[in-house]
Image (tube, rainbow, N blue to C red):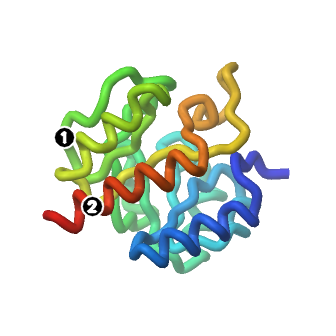
Amino acid sequence: MPLWALSVADHARLKRWGNELGFPYAVTMHDVQSFEVDCDYEKLGSFDYLQQELRDAAARSGKPVIVSGSLLPGVLQAERSLTCVSKYPANYGYSGGSGGYSCHSVPQLAWDHVLAAAPHCHTIEVHVTDRPVTARPQPGDMCVSMRTQQFINLSKEVGQIWRAE
């Protein structure tokens, strides 16, 4: 069973909501079963990118791929890359870089860090779960996540910034 922070129904609801606002929806693929989720982009984290079976599944999917981190060997052509600290939790925000930001900030800081990055980024990753945990699981994304409604509210603010640019 895949380690999903959201149910398939939750993913569908967020994808529909985001698409209505003009945002493409991406899901981090931690295992081959994750590719069952309907999304516009597939995202591979720097650690997941090292798994050949995930790179192969992403290539077979035919969907655009986002890669976090600095691991971009020519095996898989990433459409976008995100600056990613690969540290859980991070207590600091966006410091410039590739034009994309993978936010691993603690939940109390994530809102401010994302809004500070929004004028400078074409893509921002925020971890979302409605089953937060306090102990560090594998992957650590579930420790540095906001709830669905927080994500929706933050997305509205980011959208206002992007439309103003």
Q: Look at the picture and state if 90 lies above or below 29.
A: above
Neighbor class of circle 1 (other Cα within 10 Å; few <14, some 14-19, many 20+) is few
Image x and y of residue 22, in percent = 39, 76
135 and 153: which is toward the camera: 153
What's the mark number on residue 160?
Answer: 2
Q: Residue at x 65, y 68 (%)?
A: 13
In the rendered view, does 149 fall on the left or right side of 89? Answer: right
Give the residue type that dot 1 points to: Gly
In the rendered view, does 30 fall on the left or right side of 93? Answer: right
Q: Residue at x 76, y 57 (%)?
A: 7
What's the mark number on residue 96?
Answer: 1
Q: Look at the picture and state if 104 lies above or below 45.
A: above
Q: Residue furthest right?
A: 1
Whether label 1 touches label 2, CB < 8 Å: no
Q: Is residue 50 visible?
A: no
- The numbered mark, 1 or 2, whose residue comes first in the sequence reads 1
- Judged by depth in the image, the label closer to the viewer, 1 or 2, is 2
Give the residue type that dot 2 points to: Gln
Q: CA distance from mark 1 to mark 2?
A: 21 Å
71 and 66: which is toward the camera: 66
Q: Secondary structure at mark 1?
A: loop
Q: Is residue 157 visible?
A: yes
17 and 61: which is toward the camera: 17
Q: Quadrant of residue 36?
A: bottom right
Q: Secondary structure at mark 2?
A: helix
Q: Residue at x 40, y 39 (%)?
A: 103
How many numbered callouts?
Answer: 2
Q: Residue at x 59, y 64 (%)?
A: 14
The C terminus is located in which quarter? bottom left
